[in-house]
Image (cartoon, rainbow, N blue to C red):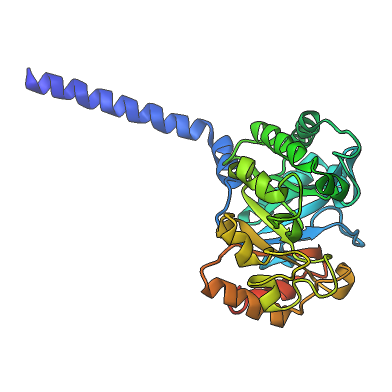
């Protein structure tokens, strides 16, 4: 009796394992795709691309972006894709799949940036839910890893109407692009984290309401004044009285997770109006921050000026390539 039961049990276990193995083999592509899309942990090394390059449609060859682990195509606008984002749509589906596979193999995520300085979605009356649905549909159609929300509607932020729009938009966007399958980042300017200036609460309000839906912030520490965020002290520990409490560690002290704050800088003096720090000096600032427990990473505007050489230098003292 025992031997008979044992044989039946062994047969059942063998049958069960065969079924499980068959299930894994039967759907490997979807599983691999989900694994490839999984949100990476910090540090994040993020570069944007907007300008056209002769002979290059969409992202460059993956060998040209060594040192970066997130490449963002700019921009998706309310009226549709432009610049590098539009180039991505011009590629064939098979070419996009090939490029995506190469970037995934190199550990580099491909995102699209939305809005930028061109769109002012709140001021122009764009519906946040409809806009989020349209953007999410575009991301799915063209097979990207997610979205960077480069919201720059300054009049709306100054007037206290931006926050509600951003919160509604982000909530809907995340419902369409689930966490763990798609990345959602935001790219606020650093002053929007001040606790004392914006009537609607600025990005501290956004973070308190939907920060859990945002994977990290690519903070723009530039274009905010000729002397703003241009020294290690001003960037890391004590911002000026113009934009109080918006240096990196001051934002952290306001309740934003250190691992979600990526330091953004222009690659050259020509890539921004102000806020530039040369790569060697910036490397020292980044090292100071890392030694104090921060590990968010670095962002730059824009490729190809923000080259592999640029990020290698900036990472050299903290996360050598």
The answer to whether residue 87 is above or below residue 300 is above
- Of 170 and 253, the residue lying toward us: 253
- Of 141 and 151, the residue lying toward us: 151
Q: Position of residue 145 (x, y in %)?
A: 68, 45
- Name which quarter of the figure residue 255 lies in: bottom right
Question: Relative to residue 219, is residue 105 drawn left or right?
Answer: left
- Of 32 and 287, the residue lying toward us: 287
Q: Quadrant of the C terminus?
A: bottom right
- Please name the residue shown 67% across and 45% down the image: 205
Residue farthest along the left direction in this orientation? 1
Q: Quadrant of the N terminus?
A: top left
Q: Position of residue 310 (x, y in %)?
A: 74, 74
Q: Position of residue 68 (x, y in %)?
A: 68, 64
Question: Relative to residue 233, is residue 80 drawn left or right?
Answer: right
Q: Position of residue 249 (x, y in %)?
A: 60, 66
- Please name the residue shown 58% across and 77% down the image: 288
- Name which quarter of the figure residue 218 lies in: bottom right
- Please name the residue shown 67% across and 77% down the image: 233
| Total marks in image | 0
The answer to whether residue 192 is seen in the rendering is yes
- Please name the residue shown 25% across and 24% down the image: 11
The answer to whether residue 233 is above or below residue 21 is below
The answer to whether residue 311 is above or below residue 36 is below
């Amino acid at each position: 009796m025992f031997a008979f039961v044992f044989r039946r049990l062994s047969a059942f276990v063998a049958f069960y394992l065969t079924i499980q193995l068959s299930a894994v083999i039967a759907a490997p592509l979807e599983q691999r795709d989900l694994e490839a899309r999984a949100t990476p942990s910090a540090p994040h090394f993020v570069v944007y691309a907007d300008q056209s390059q002769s002979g290059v449609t969409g992202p460059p060859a993956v060998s040209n972006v060594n040192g970066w682990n997130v490449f963002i195509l700019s921009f998706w606008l309310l009226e549709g894709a432009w610049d590098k984002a539009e180039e991505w749509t011009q590629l064939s589906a098979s070419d996009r799949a090939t490029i995506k596979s190469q970037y995934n193999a190199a550990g580099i995520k491909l995102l699209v940036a939305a809005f930028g300085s061109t769109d002012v979605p709140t001021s122009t009356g764009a519906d946040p839910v409809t806009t989020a649905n349209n953007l999410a549909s575009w991301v799915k159609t063209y097979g990207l890893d997610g979205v960077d929300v480069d919201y720059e509607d300054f009049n709306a932020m100054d007037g206290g109407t931006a926050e509600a729009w951003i919160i509604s938009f982000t909530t809907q966007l995340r419902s369409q692009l689930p966490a763990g399958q798609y990345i959602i980042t935001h790219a606020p300017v650093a002053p929007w984290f001040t606790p004392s200036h914006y009537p609607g609460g600025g990005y501290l309000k956004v973070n308190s309401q939907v920060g859990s839906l945002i994977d990290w912030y690519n903070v723009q520490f530039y274009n905010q004044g000729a002397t703003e965020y241009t020294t290690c002290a001003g960037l890391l520990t004590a911002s000026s009285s113009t934009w109080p409490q918006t240096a990196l560690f001051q934002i952290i002290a306001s309740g934003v997770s250190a691992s979600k704050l990526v330091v953004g800088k222009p690659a050259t003096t020509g890539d921004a109006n102000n806020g530039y720090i040369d790569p060697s000096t910036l490397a020292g600032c980044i090292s100071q921050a890392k030694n104090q427990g921060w590990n968010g990473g670095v962002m730059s505007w824009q490729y190809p000026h923000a080259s592999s050489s640029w990020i290698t230098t900036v990472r050299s003292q903290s996360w050598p390539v």
